[in-house]
Image: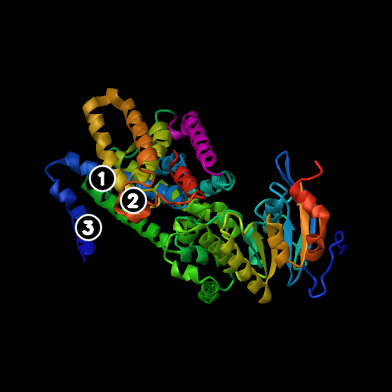
Amino acid sequence: MSSPQNAAPQASVGAPLLSVTNLEVRYGDLIGVADVSLVVPKGSVVALLGSNGAGKTTTLNAIAGIVPASKGKIEFEGQAIAGQPAYAIVRKGLALSPEGWRLFVQQTVEANLLLGATPLADKSQAPHLLQKVYAIFPRLAERRLQRAGTMSGGERQMLAVGRALMSAPHMLLLDEPSLGLAPAIVESMYETFQKLHKDGLTILLAEQSVDLALEVSDTAYVLQVGKSVLSGSARELANNAEVQRIYLGAGH
Amino acid sequence: MQHRFFWIAVGVLALAYPILTMPFPVYQRLGALVLLAAIGASAWNVVGGYAGQVSVGHAIFFGIGAYSAVLGYHYLGLPPILGVPLGMIVCIAIAAVIGVPTLKLSGHYFSMATIAVAELVRVLVPTFDSLGGAQGLSGPTLPRTVLDLSFTSAMPYYYLFLTVLVAILFVTWRIENSRMGFYLRAIKDSERAARSLGVEAGRYKLYAYMLSAAMTAMAGGLYLTMIGFVDPESGFGILISVKMLIMAALGGAGVLFGPLVGALILVPLEEISNSLLGGKGAGITYVVYGAIIIIIARFLPNGLLALLKPTQVKPADAPNGSPVGAGEKHAA
């Protein structure tokens, strides 16, 4: 496999779990993502940075199979997954916690979580996974019979992540998990992500909040108008003037 | 305990109704018509209510059910009721053909596509002389055997329809509490989220659509056994589809007894308006239905039965999802 551009490999991480090469996504005549390439090594946390409209969400949705890729390759665990339906991809162990949560607001917290267990081949694991998610987010256990539509933003984010975890994924795609949440909640959310990472979960994280993302990630990619324009280790990017420029919009 | 007494009372009343109304054949007939309408609306409810795919073209299946019952008699001399299973099988196949492309559409686009297909059939049927053309076809005028189910009293129809309705509600109840029901609710709530969680939304919607089509064909076949006549308008007319939808929506779409409650209100209303206005007022029915659609959409998005369940209404629902849910489910 020819490795896509300058993805600075990390010392502590393994072979690529997910690799995206020259991804393009079109919505009719509109181009959502023009040319994105990235590699997520097994066991790492990779951040996808970029301002509003840079194509982060579209990239994650294309990886998860929610929107079709018009060009490019997506490989997960060595298998090409571009063009496969969402339900087939999540069964392979690639789960998405979507932007805006997309909860089933009319249903209880527990029903939402159990729906997350849909891809499991062995449904008898569901109760065990449910206990695990409740251990990670005790708040969800307290609210298990409450309807999802009646919860606060932070609780909804917990539920979206918990629901994704119910499929026992090898890799988690997190789309803007800090969006619209109070700083204290964001902090505890990120602590949870780090815990999950320590337990062996590979994470691809789309985030507007650069400092936060670079703090937890090993590598990061910067998207700008639908293209991956920069990549490197989190430390390199944190000190990179270009990153600051892209975010602050200077130079225009 | 209170609940049990309520249900026993309802059951006893349902069984005793034709006997209580023995001196008034009109009311016996009304009871049978209510049950028949409830069968159709409950059939619609499987895909329109539980799966949230608002079909406005279910007349196709109703018409095929009615026509297959009458065609078996017309060409082979079979009792109409024997044509019903055939109609159900045909409808399952046709639902698969229509459903695969149209169920890819979301919300109102699906509704519009189903209207288009149903209207196409309504317009085409009169061009076939073998289907009775625009005049339609009649069932047996005089009963040859009891299997012809041709009775002067409405009482036998009442009990036949009651049995079928109970069977349909039982099947629906089983689905509601199965994995499929769980997935259908998720699809209705947010199809995109359901798909991204691994629910094969297309497959479950299609199953619901096919099942609903078969049940609707049964309603059409039963209609023919009672009325004994079908023409393109009474089989495939858009009002047939709209009635199913409105009854379910009025009582509560996606609620087991919603369509029955809707039928209990609307069928007598229709009979009253017909008898008050006579033949001249036929068009007024459309006006009444239009008004009911507006009232449901504005004041009762979850139907009458939701009023009994205060937990159902939570004004504090946050912006993501709830307006979509309310808007798409019941839009006609």
Verify whether residue A245 appears in magenta: no
Which residue is disc 3 drawn over? B11
The crowding category of the residue bearing disc 2, from other C-alpha atoms within 10 Å (few below 14, some 14 to 19, many at least 20), is some
Chain at tag 2: B
The residue labelled by disc 2 is B306
SS label for mark 2: helix
Q: CA distance from mark 1 to mark 3?
A: 15 Å
Vertical order, B76 against A176 (above or below): above
Dominant secondary structure of the residues highlighted in magenta in the image: helix
Q: CA distance from mark 2 to mark 3?
A: 22 Å
* Residue B171 on image: x %, y %: 39, 59
Q: Residue extending furthest left?
A: B23
Name the residue type under label 3: Gly
On the image, numbered disc 1 is attached to which residue? B32
Q: Nearer the viewer, mark 1 or mark 3?
A: 3
Does B144 sit left or right of A70 as displayed? left
Q: Quadrant of the N terminus of chain A?
A: bottom right
- Out of B35 and A108, give the one closest to the viewer: A108
Q: Which residues are magenta?
A: B106-133
